[in-house]
């Protein structure tokens, strides 16, 4: 399939309009119609109904393939450009809020850095397509286990560090004085689900093979202070890396002792990093100086 035709189809399906797709892609409406007709002829199946503009069953199936295919093409282009281009002085780093620990922040260059806060699933795609030079991703894992990253392109990842995780509770919570907590003791508690700011609740369920953990409030922002304030106010429990949880006002951080889980951070890159990107990789993956 011609990727130009595929990209046109995805745009029309997303916008549900031939004219809006033409405007976004910089084509005439006639050219967009021709692209869709050519793709339908190539595949031997109608992909869209015209009024309204809605994918057919075959079109829905094509959409499932189209995203990964187009992402791979962008990743291939970015990889080749990265190899051919001269090293740049600047650095674009994509990271989740909880991946930016003290060591990572201290290792950033003094100037020329662009920092982008993205979700865990968005960061590998950003690195693969060249919109970020490096990515810092994090998650919950068993000690020494690597994170499971989306397979979007041939990317390398290396561990940056691991630390214990803590359950953040209001100071007046009945379990706040415990020296440690088991997740099985908390399956019926009220939980905060903050996939962009904290450690996602679904990952905690998967990593611990624990049922329950019902969501009381879902926070879709990226600000850690807001998340810890919600926990301190009693809107739900959350699990955070120890250094983020330790000093939250109005809350107590109690270590999670069972199951054995850690907060793991990895740096993600494509090809062979150069310049400031290479220096940051060396700094974060080399031996600790303190």
Image: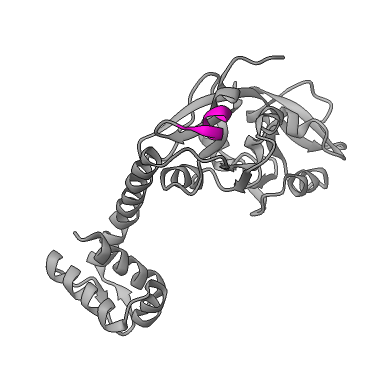
Question: From this viewpoint, is residue 209 visible?
Answer: no
State the quadrant of the C terminus: top right
Does 53 sit above or below residue 239?
Answer: below
What colour scheme was applied to this rendering of the protein? Answer: one colour
Q: Is residue 151 left or right of residue 184?
A: left
Indicate whether residue 288 is drawn in magenta.
no
Residue 106, position as x, y percentages in the image: 71, 30
Q: Residue at x 51, y 45 (%)?
A: 132
Q: Quadrant of residue 51?
A: bottom left
State the quadrant of the N terminus: bottom left
Residue 246, position as x, y percentages in the image: 79, 30
Q: Residue at x 54, y 42 (%)?
A: 202
Indicate whether residue 275 is drawn in magenta.
yes
Residue 105, position as x, y percentages in the image: 69, 33
Q: Residue at x 68, y 27 (%)?
A: 103
Count of numbered circles in the view = 0
Residue 80, position as x, y percentages in the image: 33, 42
Question: From this viewpoint, is residue 14 visible?
Answer: yes
Q: Quadrant of residue 186?
A: top right
The residue nearer to you, when weighing 282 against 231, is 282
The residue nearer to you, when weighing 140 against 74, is 74
Does 43 sit above or below residue 273?
Answer: below
Examine the residues drawn in magenta and state their main secondary structure.
helix
Tell me which segment is drawn in magenta: 273-280
Q: Quadrant of residue 214?
A: top right
């Amino acid at each position: 399939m011609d990727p130009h035709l595929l990209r046109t189809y995805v745009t029309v399906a997303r916008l549900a309009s031939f004219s809006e797709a033409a405007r976004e892609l910089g084509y005439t409406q006639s050219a967009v119609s021709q692209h869709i007709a050519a793709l339908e002829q190539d595949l031997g199946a109608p992909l869209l109904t015209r009024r309204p503009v809605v994918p057919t069953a075959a079109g829905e199936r094509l959409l499932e393939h189209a995203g990964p295919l187009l992402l791979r093409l962008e990743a291939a282009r970015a990889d080749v450009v990265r190899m051919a281009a001269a090293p740049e002085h600047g650095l674009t780093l994509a990271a989740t809020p909880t991946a930016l620990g003290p060591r990572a922040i201290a290792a950033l260059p003094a100037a020329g850095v662009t920092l982008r806060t993205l979700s865990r699933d968005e960061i590998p795609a950003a690195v693969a397509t060249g919109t970020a030079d490096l990515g810092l991703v994090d998650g919950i894992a068993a000690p020494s286990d690597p994170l499971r990253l989306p397979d979007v392109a041939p990317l390398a990842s290396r561990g940056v560090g691991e630390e214990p995780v803590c359950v953040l509770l209001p100071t007046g919570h009945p379990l706040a004085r415990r020296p440690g907590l088991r997740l099985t003791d908390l399956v019926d508690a009220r939980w905060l689900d903050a996939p962009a700011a904290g450690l996602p609740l679904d990952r905690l369920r998967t990593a611990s093979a624990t049922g329950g953990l019902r969501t009381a409030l879902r926070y879709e922002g990226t600000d850690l202070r807001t998340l810890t304030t919600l926990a301190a106010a009693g809107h739900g429990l959350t699990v955070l890396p120890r250094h983020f949880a330790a000093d939250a006002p109005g809350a107590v951080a109690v270590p999670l002792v069972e199951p054995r889980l850690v907060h793991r951070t990895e740096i993600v890159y494509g090809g062979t990093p150069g310049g400031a990107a290479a220096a940051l990789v060396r700094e974060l993956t080399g031996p600790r100086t303190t």
